[in-house]
Amino acid sequence: MRTYVRMVVCIYIPRFELAVAAGEGSKVAQQTLAGRALAVAPLVGGEQRVGEVSGAAEARGVARGMTLGEALARCPDLVLVPGDPVLVAEAWETALRALESIGAAVEPARPGLAYFESDGLRGIHGPVSATIAAASRALAHPVRIGAGPTRFCALAAALAVRSRRPLVLDGGEARRWLAGRPVELLGFREDTATLIEPLSRLGVRTLGELERLGRPALSDRFGAPGALAHRLARGEDSPLRARRVEERLEESMEVGDASSGEALKRVLGVLVGRLLARSERRGRTLRAATLSARLVAGGGWRERVVFRQALCDPERIWLALSVRLLALPAPAAVLELAAERFGPPASEQGALFDEDPACSVARSARPGAHAIRSAHPGAPSAARAARLREAVAQVRAVAGQDAALRAVCVDPDSRVPERRVVLAPIPE
């Protein structure tokens, strides 16, 4: 019987945010290909740090996240392109849906970087090479594609590609190949990005040198990020977590003279009413929404808002969103509101562990109340479990899938405290 090795495919679109902000096929985008030093300008009213930079700017010492003053000092002829997070989010959502159209369960890491497993697509497209070809055809951007047994191996392969020909690494080959890759690859993971500078000062240049330091030494000096970096250098990584594909409802309106202040809040109220009136909502509540604006001076502004609980009350939704309008960096030309995640059809605020006294009094006043309670002994616990599931779902909408975990006793008699109890995900 033939066995297949699990294969992760990495989709990497170089300088995605810069290309989208510059405009596909525009003169500025052509300057990027011609070697001009470009960088995404800081947002008005935000932290004065440049965004994504072109290769020419990178060669002159300008890096993403650098302060604007330092970037201009290193490269005086640096051209700043107005950032547009709204347009970037829309373009990236289009790219993700294009990948999902071929059947892929995608895990987006950041705009321009995504992963999916090819094993489940073998019956649709065939081997991994045919799956990669289908993904390349689905995307409208020039991409670099790599494949490997883990997420980190696939990323390293995609970054090493210098043409449209993908690089596929097998299991044993991947670990040997990783040993010669630069340690700067750790910068693509948020948990290990801070290790690049201290490792460079210690003279560690490749992942193979990092692996030879040993996990105990790295854990002792850097803690959990050091242990994770050692696992990545050995070709180990956590499983993929594909995003949940949900229906997205959007409403937008040109604001005209109501570009700020109380008038803009009234426009927001109209958008909230329109969104809740959409028939596609089917009575569902909203867990999270995205408020965005096209600015009069160019560029955009975008903010994700997660409510305390799933809501369908227009006044409460408006109150939660109107506060965010204070962070608008400049007058808006167009205001947009999108429902990002939906909740259950009805949202009830009830007691988590005790039955509502009003309900118990009303129930006891009805004839035959004792018989009803005895006939359904599990009703309070079932309601409590439903409320707990709703609370877990809302917490995950706020802080991600790892925000809600449960403690599982593994070895209660162990002398090592860390071995007695482990944290495990709560099933949905």
Image (spheres, grey):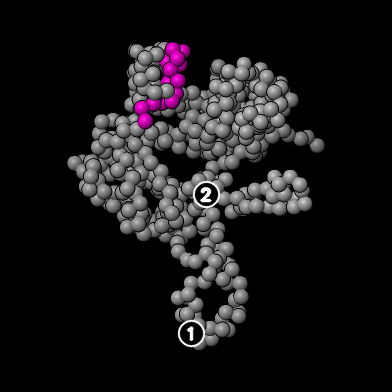
Depth order, front residue of 424/172? 424
Q: Quadrant of residue 183?
A: top right
Q: Nearer the viewer, residue 139 or 19?
A: 19
The x and y percentages for residue 265 are: 26, 48
Sequence-first disc among 2 and 1: 1
Q: Main secondary structure of the magenta part?
A: loop
Residue 261, can we see it?
A: yes
Asked if 427 appears above or below 231 in the picture, the reply is below
Q: Which residue is mark 2?
A: 396
Tell me if residue 375 comes above or below residue 271 in the rendering.
below
Q: Amino acid at mark 2?
A: Arg
Which dot marks residue 298? Answer: none
Q: Quadrant of residue 285?
A: bottom left
Seen at 69% across and 27% down, the residue is: 217
Q: How many marks?
A: 2
Instruction: Look at the image and give the residue range highlighted in magenta.
Output: 47-65
- Give the answer, above or below, for where 391 lies relative to 183: below
Question: Of all residues shown, which one is farthest toward the right?
Answer: 1
- Residue at image position (45%, 75%) is 358
Q: Quadrant of the N terminus?
A: top right
Residue ID at (44%, 12%):
60
The reply to whether the magenta stretch includes residue 344 is no
User: Label 2 neighbourhood size at 10 Å, few (<14), some (14-19), many (20+)?
Assistant: some
The image quadrant where one finds the C terminus is bottom right
Would you say residue 277 is visible in this rendering? no
Q: Which residue is mark 1?
A: 366
